[in-house]
Image (spheres, rainbow, N blue to C red):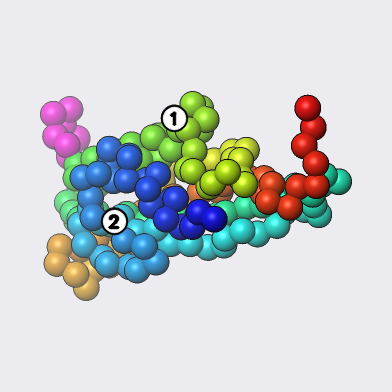
Amino acid sequence: MIDKNQAIIDYLITCPYIQNSPLYFNLIEAHDNNVQIVTTSEDITTRRPYVNGEIPKRYTFNLITFKSITDLAVVKDDEYMNENVDDLADVQTLLDWLHEQEDEHNYPDFGKDCYIDSLQTTTDTPRFDGINTELTPPLAMYSIAIVINYIDTSKMLWKEN
């Protein structure tokens, strides 16, 4: 049986955004550009098993990204780039990558006894979770909640032709 947590790690390290950032699992290491995978639930049965024994399940997790932040006001100049705006746009590329994977039905490998029905983010933009001003530089924390709906076929009684 494939470990779904490892499958998520293997899947996410193919993302260009994550390839260039340190990735942690269930550990918050607050540094600029770090990405954390934080599991919220694993293998939750979403309904009673189907009559053929298949079980609909859900795996949910959050991706948390830290970005250095500036306290400078936005300059009203077309050529000036604000670090905070750029950082949010940078984190958005991770979320956009996830949407592209869903559009292409490119999912993590949960093994031969599972097939993934969908991979969805709960929002279209990263959620701003706050600022840690105790660090130098101060860090903004952004999160993306991801829900994977899949079917567990390990207890399937028969296969339809």
- Residue that carries the numbered disc 2 in the rendered image: 23
Front position in the image: 81 or 155? 155
The image shows residue 158 at horizontal and vertical percentages of: 80, 41
Q: Is residue 80 magenta?
A: yes
Q: Residue at x 47, y 33 (%)?
A: 106
- The answer to whether residue 154 is above or below residue 17 is below
Stretch in magenta: 74-81
Q: Does residue 88 appear in this view?
A: no
The image shows residue 111 at horizontal and vertical percentages of: 54, 46
**Is 122 situated left or right of 156 in this image?**
left
- Residue that carries the numbered disc 1 in the rendered image: 100
Q: Residue at x 40, y 44 (%)?
A: 11
Residue placed furthest toward the right: 51
Q: Is residue 160 magenta?
A: no
Q: Amino acid at mark 2?
A: Leu
- The answer to whether residue 16 is above or below residue 161 is below
- The answer to whether the residue labelled 2 contacts the one labelled 1, judged by CB atoms less than 8 Å apart, is no
In terms of secondary structure, where does tag 1 sit? helix
For disc 1, the neighbor class at 10 Å (few under 14, some 14 to 19, many from 20) is few
For disc 2, the neighbor class at 10 Å (few under 14, some 14 to 19, many from 20) is many
